[in-house]
Image (cartoon, rainbow, N blue to C red):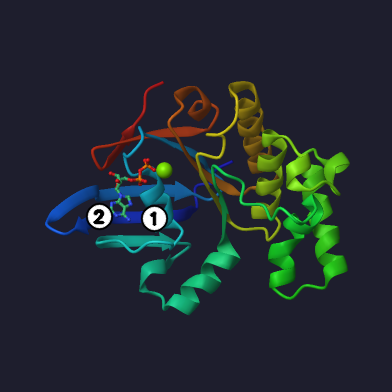
Amino acid sequence: MSNGESMIKIENLSRTYTDGANKVQVLTELNLNVDRGEQLAIVGSSGSGKSTLLHLIGGLDKPTAGNVIVQGTDIHKLSAKAQGDFRNKHIGFVYQFHHLLPEFEAQDNVAMPLIIRGMKRSDAQKRANALIDKVGLSHRKTHKPSELSGGERQRIAFARALVTEPDCVLADEPTGNLDHATATHVYELMCELNREMGTTFITVTHDLELAGKMQRQLHLEDGVLSALEL
Ligand SMILES: Nc1ncnc2c1ncn2[C@@H]1O[C@H](COP(=O)(O)OP(=O)(O)O)[C@@H](O)[C@H]1O
Ligand SMILES: [Mg+2]
């Protein structure tokens, strides 16, 4: 839960795509503060710029104007290498499609970000297994993605995003591919992980009811964010 300390500060953020003579202004001088430990849902219809916004927060895309400050660091002023390092250290991503590696068991998928960082395999496995326990899938550690249900795969994707203990997880319609009951469970899991680990969660969705599970809701429409009354 939020403790009032700033985690992400977005200042006058704009993103325009130029395609030949066509200009699409997706985000217009957007401002947002997210506290450490907050759960924030951003709701918007398809094409409203939700993915664009998450990519800018995570440093996967460059703004046309404005700043994204994550824990005091203006991430778009960093070199590509420094930005990559910063992202690996502070941010976890979860997408609509799990992007798990099909040939690896759940525990290897979750351990992968640690192994890539050079952690000893046995230590990485130990940490991965602790995260898999947290997402309630102790009995699925040695299953491959094809042997898991859609909801289980997304739980493993959350475990993988959290295994490096990021300050913030950015989730782009993480339940867009799941039935409503399963999606609800995944949102409940996010809230639980937020309470237990203190990780900031920013989730985008087009589903108002799911958004209502989070602590705060904002509406993205016509390039601007506004408070959402549920
Ligand atoms: N690389 C791109 N080039 C041109 N237009 C883009 C690009 N990426 C997204 N857009 C446009 O920006 C708008 C917002 O896209 P997006 O952020 O993916 O929306 P959402 O995630 O809310 O569905 C859409 O109109 C989309 O067509
Ligand atoms: Mg999107």
Q: Nearer the viewer, mark 2 or mark 1?
A: 2
Q: Is mark 2 within 8 Å of ligand 1?
A: no
User: Considering only vertical position in the picture, is 106 above or below 43?
Assistant: below
The image quarter containing residue 136 is top right
Q: In this rendering, would 129 be left or right of 200?
A: right
Q: Looking at the figure, which quarter contains the C terminus?
A: top left
Q: In this rendering, would 115 be left or right of 184?
A: right
Depth check: 59 or 166 in front? Answer: 59
Depth check: 171 or 17 in front? Answer: 17
Q: Amino acid at mark 1?
A: Lys
Label located before the other in sequence (2 or 1): 1
Q: Amino acid at mark 2?
A: Ser
Depth check: 122 or 3 in front? Answer: 122
At 37% from the left and 50% from the top, the residue drawn is 53
Residue 58, given in percent of the width and then of the height, sits at 46, 58
Residue 197, given in percent of the width and then of the height, sits at 69, 48
At 23% from the left and 38% from the top, the residue drawn is 222
At 43% from the left and 62% from the top, the residue drawn is 60
At 49% from the left and 29% from the top, the residue drawn is 211
The image quarter containing residue 21 is bottom left
Distance between the alpha carbons at the discs numbered 2 and 1: 14 Å
User: Considering only vertical position in the picture, is 97 above or below 74?
Assistant: above
Residue 121, given in percent of the width and then of the height, sits at 83, 69
Q: Which mark is residue 55?
A: none
Residue 182, given in percent of the width and then of the height, sits at 65, 27
Q: Residues within 10 Å of mark 2 (few under 14, many from 20)?
A: many
Q: Looking at the figure, which quarter contains the N terminus?
A: top right
Q: Is mark 1 within 8 Å of ligand 1?
A: no
How many marks overall?
A: 2
Residue of label 2: 14
Mark 1 element type: strand
Q: Which mark is residue 9?
A: 1
